[in-house]
């Protein structure tokens, strides 16, 4: 019988009611008395010297209140990189300043170099156009292609960086000679060059920010589309604006999706605050979709050469990769961590392979900044591994299922120290592989292939076995590796006098359903109804200092902080119960929502304890404080390691090259499951994005740095017809060993495991269909690419 | 500025508008009905779908003046008279057909238009009809399931082939 409440129940989401009735409150839905409108003036060229900004063109235009240029922010700080990476030779990465508004040079199409504030949106837009028309920007040659950027020293994104290189990173550098030797002496080496295509995150809600300034107190308020309001506050206050942290409130209200792109601080947030102060009026800015395409941090964009050394039976001996990773024109906050410690550390996958070496050169180009997008580094690692493994199987005539099975780590090998620095705590990779084979009816594939052939379609099956490190992250470890922030989280549990609870969490829900799931956990632990628990998130004035939601961290890190705060509540409740029941504290037990004296029928309900805490008429105040409110911070001891096995089946139309995903099966190990319905939804969404990357999505700049895919008419977002129903299972569970909930995180899994499964299936279909010369097609595996490959 | 009047969710309304004011802006800014969302400005994403005289329309690409006098229905008008969720809304909650909620108003309005035309759509018909509504969160699985459930079909066995 499925549970109907608490941990493990598919509780329906409470947040749905407001979203389904049009009563959600997203940033752009807010209406503030006296509000004004900001519109950014953006570069139409990828690279140029700002000769003059035509601010005078806006003077006297109707409704115009203020104009800002890069000059106005020359004295304030820049938007910093959150992670210091050192090159192989020990030198620190190059960190060019990222100003609020471009000053001196513009470095990508969409780079804002001025902003105008007006009474209405249309007036601001008209004035911004007038400024753009009157500005003089001397166009410079654009640096777009990564290989050319590194090779052509005369053409620089940042004048002070001669080779456009941010860093040249080796992981683990001490292993390099050993790995080189292993590859040199291996019986077989498979080499694959591939592109992990650049993606635009495309949260459906465009970024938006509202700045307010209260002259009476000197307080600022920023309402913004953020996945992590405290991190945004820290960046804006301490690094960019120089506002005392305690004078800035950041609110991230209902946020319409993030996928990574709303982790980062963007210049518009600083601009609306500065403008609000100058005008003493609220200033709002909302991106148009074209601005989202041009300026949201993009994802992926790796060009990789991977080598897999093995014996003739397919036992892995070594992996070696060389990657060029695009960071775009400026360093977005976590852009340097994504291609390094979120990528290189996963390059041994779920496999027993003794020798792994990863080299990443990170390159500046005249394109939008690139940063973490759902999965962030881990999809890139998984894609490289899972594609080269399939290629090796084909070269050696081996079965890709059996090769993976014999190379997977076995359950007795945990905890497992990987050769690229991680300590996997637990897992059972055979179990998820067995499960997905059962779900997909692998034995019945030939029959399905024949049925597809009868329809004139080529059918293929692709497998990927994947692992990720999430629950980001142990601060002591990431600190050693260069992180400039800690990655703990925090929760405050406030039991109110009437016995209901307000739980303030540092995690932020922008679709994940924390308001429901976190309440389930509280209700389960305290034996109270879910309906009596309110989850508060997204407002620095109400919540403790937490680091927000990304990296599948909300439950594993913030959920654990909440669990620890609940432990403290129970401990305090026991003290109160001991006083009320005139018993020794050590004799009080808690269960089923009651504090009882062990071995007696004396008990107090949770509600009675709560009321007593706030009406402490006879408390021994020297030993018992009134009130029932506790805060806990939690810093994880390790990452968590979700893993799984995915099988995709495709049909390929030989005439057009069109690929249809006809079946997709996922067997995941997420540890313990808090709400199965929400876990399934997370996997669906991740797989949908992964299929989008594999088949549809491609961000294309031309040689001048113009974005050719800047709208939904050019950028192929997956639509309902492009994807199938997904078959999802999470019954293989090896609970995380180092957090009390035993949870691992499920938010990114689908986007990590699915792209290689799709591409492996396409190559399998072509191979089986007689196109044996096709061993690889880069994503997106679009009809034209498939047709061209088949007919090459 | 011109005064534009219409009926929205059964209520007669009017507001001063510029000629270039879009229906989405008229609803969101003029009437403060912010359930209708603007996700792309180019008629692609469908977050802004409302019904105009019973037909689904992308309100981000219609001038308010062009639908003066029309009968407009938005997400705010989809609940039952007692305030409880309507059948389609309830199916979206029951089947977890939404995550961040931003595309949801447009999805619900498009689904309602589909079911008005085709009371028992197949999976393929649902997917095809929703081609003008983009969702980035759900991978569409539970949206398609919710729409089929709202049409009274048994969706308990729906999965990949």
Image (spheres, helix red, strand yellow):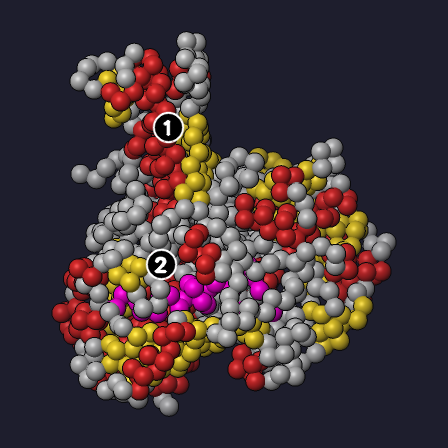
Residue that protrudes farthest toward the left in the picture = A443
Residue depicted at 39% across the width and 37% down the height: A562
Direction from residue A126 to residue A556 in the image, left or right: left
For mark 2, name the chain: A
Whichever of callouts 1 and 2 sits on the residue coming sooner in the sequence is: 2
Q: Magenta stretch? A: A326-351
Query: Residue at (81%, 60%) from the top-left corner?
Result: A55
Q: Visible in this render: residue B7?
A: yes
Q: Position of residue A356 (x, y in %)?
A: 33, 74
**Residue for point 67% across, 74% down:** A160
- Quadrant of the image for the C terminus of chain B? bottom left
Tell me the SS state at disc 1.
helix
Q: Name the residue under label 2.
A: A469
- The secondary element bearing badge 2 is classed as loop
Vertical order, A32 against A41 (above or below): above
- Report the residue marked by disc 1: A569
Return the residue nearer the eye: A216 or B126.
A216
Residue B86, percent from left and from top: 40, 38
Location of residue A243 with respect to A651 vertically, above or below: above
């Amino acid at each position: 019988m499925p549970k109907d409440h608490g941990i493990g129940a598919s509780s329906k989401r409470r947040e749905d009611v407001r979203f389904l009735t049009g009563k959600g409150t997203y940033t752009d839905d807010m209406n503030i008395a006296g509000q004004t409108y900001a519109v950014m003036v953006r570069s139409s060229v990828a690279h140029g010297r700002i000769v003059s900004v035509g601010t005078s063109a806006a003077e006297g235009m109707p409704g115009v209140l203020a104009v800002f240029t890069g000059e106005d922010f020359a004295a304030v700080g820049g938007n910093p990189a959150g992670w210091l990476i050192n090159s192989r030779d020990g030198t620190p990465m190059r960190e060019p300043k990222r100003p609020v508004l471009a000053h001196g040079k513009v470095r990508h199409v969409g780079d804002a170099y001025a902003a105008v504030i007006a009474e209405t949106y249309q007036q601001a837009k008209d004035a911004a156009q007038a400024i753009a028309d009157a500005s003089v920007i001397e166009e410079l040659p654009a640096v777009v292609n990564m290989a050319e950027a590194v090779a052509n020293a005369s053409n620089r994104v940042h004048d002070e960086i001669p080779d456009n290189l941010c860093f040249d990173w080796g992981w683990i550098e001490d292993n390099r000679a050993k790995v080189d030797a292993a590859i040199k002496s291996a019986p077989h080496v498979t080499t694959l060059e591939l592109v992990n295509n650049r993606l635009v995150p495309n949260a459906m809600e465009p970024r938006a920010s509202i700045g307010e300034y209260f002259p009476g107190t000197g307080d600022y308020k920023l309402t913004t589309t953020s996945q992590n309001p405290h991190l945004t506050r820290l960046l804006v206050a301490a690094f960019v604006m120089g506002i005392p942290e305690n004078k800035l409130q950041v609110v991230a209200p209902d946020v319409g999706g993030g996928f990574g792109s709303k982790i980062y601080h963007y210049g518009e947030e600083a601009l609306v605050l500065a403008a609000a102060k100058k005008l003493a009026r609220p200033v709002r800015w909302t991106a148009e979709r074209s601005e989202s395409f041009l300026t949201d941090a993009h994802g992926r964009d790796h060009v990789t050469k991977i080598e897999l050394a093995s014996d003739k039976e397919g036992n892995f001996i070594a992996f070696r990769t060389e990657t060029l990773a695009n960071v775009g024109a400026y360093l977005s906050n976590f852009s340097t961590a994504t291609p390094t410690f979120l990528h290189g550390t996963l390059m041994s996958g779920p496999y027993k392979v003794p020798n792994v070496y990863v080299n990443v050169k990170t390159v500046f180009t005249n394109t939008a900044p690139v940063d973490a997008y759902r999965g962030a580094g881990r999809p890139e690692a998984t894609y490289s591994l899972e594609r080269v493994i399939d290629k090796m199987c084909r070269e050696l005539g081996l079965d890709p299922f059996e090769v993976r099975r014999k190379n997977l780590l076995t359950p007795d090998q945990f905890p497992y120290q990987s050769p690229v620095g991680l300590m996997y705590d637990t897992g059972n990779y055979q179990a998820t592989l067995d499960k997905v084979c059962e779900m997909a009816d692998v034995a019945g594939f030939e029959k399905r292939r024949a049925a597809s052939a009868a329809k004139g379609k080529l059918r293929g099956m692709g497998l990927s076995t994947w692992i990720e490190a999430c629950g980001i992250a142990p601060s002591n470890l990431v600190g050693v590796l260069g992180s400039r922030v800690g990655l703990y989280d925090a929760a405050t549990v406030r039991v109110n006098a009437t016995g209901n609870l307000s739980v303030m969490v540092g995690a932020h829900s922008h679709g994940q359903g924390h308001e429901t799931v976190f309440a389930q956990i509280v209700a389960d632990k305290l034996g109270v109804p879910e309906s009596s628990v309110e989850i508060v998130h997204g407002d620095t004035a109400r919540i403790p200092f937490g680091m927000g939601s990304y990296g599948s961290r909300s439950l594993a890190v913030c959920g654990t902080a909440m669990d620890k705060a609940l432990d403290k509540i129970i401990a305090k409740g026991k003290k109160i119960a001991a006083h009320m029941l005139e018993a020794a504290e050590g004799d009080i037990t808690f269960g089923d929502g009651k504090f009882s004296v062990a071995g007696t029928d004396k008990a107090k309900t949770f509600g009675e304890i709560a009321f007593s805490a706030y009406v402490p008429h006879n408390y021994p105040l020297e030993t018992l404080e009134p009130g029932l409110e506790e805060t806990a911070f939690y810093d994880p001891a390790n990452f968590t390691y979700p893993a799984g096995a995915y099988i995709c089946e495709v049909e390929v139309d030989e005439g057009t090259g069109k690929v249809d995903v006809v079946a997709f099966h996922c067997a995941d190990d997420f540890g313990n499951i808090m709400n199965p319905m929400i876990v399934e939804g997370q996997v669906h969404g991740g797989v949908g994005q992964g299929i989008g990357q594999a088949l549809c999505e491609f961000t294309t700049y031309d040689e001048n740095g113009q974005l050719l895919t800047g709208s939904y008419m050019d950028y192929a977002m997956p639509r309902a017809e492009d994807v199938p129903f997904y078959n999802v299972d999470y019954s293989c569970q090896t609970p995380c060993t180092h957090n009390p909930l035993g949870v691992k995180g499920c938010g990114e899994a689908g986007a990590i495991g699915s792209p290689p499964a799709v591409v492996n299936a396409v190559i399998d279909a072509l191979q089986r269909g007689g196109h044996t010369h096709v061993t690889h097609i880069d994503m997106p595996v679009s009809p034209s690419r498939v047709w061209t490959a088949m007919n090459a | 500025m011109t005064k534009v009047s219409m009926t929205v969710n059964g209520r007669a309304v009017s507001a001063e508008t510029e000629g270039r004011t879009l229906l989405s802006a008229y609803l969101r800014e003029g009437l403060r009905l912010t359930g209708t969302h603007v996700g792309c400005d180019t008629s692609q994403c469908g977050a802004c779908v409302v019904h105009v005289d019973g037909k689904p329309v992308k309100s981000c690409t219609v001038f308010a003046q062009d639908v003066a006098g029309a009968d407009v229905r938005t997400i705010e008008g989809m609940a039952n008279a007692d305030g409880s969720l309507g059948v389609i809304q309830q199916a979206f909650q029951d089947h977890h057909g939404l995550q961040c909620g931003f595309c949801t108003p447009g999805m619900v309005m498009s689904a309602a238009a589909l079911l008005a035309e085709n009371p028992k759509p197949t999976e393929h018909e649902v997917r095809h009809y929703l081609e003008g509504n983009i969702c980035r969160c759900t991978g569409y699985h539970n949206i398609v399931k919710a729409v089929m459930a709202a049409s009274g079909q048994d969706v308990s066995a729906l999965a990949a082939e």
